[in-house]
Image (spheres, rainbow, N blue to C red):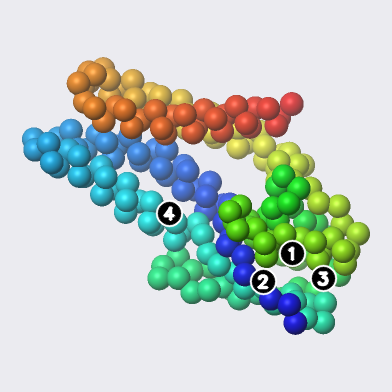
Amino acid sequence: MTEYRIKVIKQKRVFLSILIVSIGLPFCFLIPTQFELVFLKITVPILTLGILSILIYYFTFGYLRIRFENRTFDFEWEQKPIFNFKKQSSIIIDDITEIVVEQGIYLLKIKTEETDIELGGNKTKITDSLKLLKLIKSETNIKPIDSWHVLKKRGWLKIAYRINLFVLIIAIGIVITFIVLKGFDSKLLLFIPLCLSQLYFSHLQLKSKLK
């Protein structure tokens, strides 16, 4: 029996987290402006971001133990304090129809006719993810594809592009409204470009993949 331990990123939860953060982050910095004390103006956004980051981490990440024996993969999620993932059924390696990778080495998803298994190996520690990818490639004749190809094939790439563009426009509108109402006095404005730059980067990336 061979065993792998992989840090999994749930992409659907990541997209939801990005949407929530993109909409909610500007408000996290608007609220402290209502306080008089400088201490509260500084600590409230820091604490808010800290709590939000912890919740997002447990919401989107998890560790999956994969055991391979007799051409069968068995999956077991390691328990978390909150936001545990649903149990994953076992699959036979011969039932795999598609594998999704990133940059040719990061195994993101294993697909069969009946189920999708998200993996998303941690890029800083990809040993087990890479070993699992090599095993599947050696035991099957499946050619790996990337996640952009999957989205484009399903017609979701345009939808993702439009949603990201909509959120970007909304975020810019919130920033402009903040500037008009509050002016440039607040130092909290320095944090807002971090959110906008990520949305704009995603916009450019999605646009390039549509071509």
Give amino acid for label 1.
Lys
Residue where numbered disc 1 is placed: 131
Residue 93: mark in rendering: 3
Front position among marks 4 and 1: 1
Residue pointed to by mark 4:
56
Residue under the image location 39 percent in, 28 percent down: 193
- Asked whether disc 4 touches disc 2, contact meaning CB atoms under 8 Å apart, the reply is no
- Three-letter amino acid code at disc 2? Tyr
Residue type at mark 3: give it.
Answer: Ile
Q: Can residue 88 be seen in this view?
A: no
Which of the 4 image quarters holds residue 170? top left
Residue 147 is situated, as x and y percent measured from the top left of the image, at 70, 46
Left-right relation of 76 to 167: right
Q: Residue furthest left?
A: 36
Few, some or many C-alpha atoms within 10 Å of disc 4 (few <14, some 14-19, many ≥20)?
some
Badge 1 vs badge 2, beta-carbon distance below 8 Å? yes
Residue 144, numbered circle: none
Residue 139: percent from left, percent from top: 88, 67
Residue nearest the observer in this picture, 130 or 100:
130
Tell me if residue 65 comes above or below residue 110 in the rendering.
Answer: below
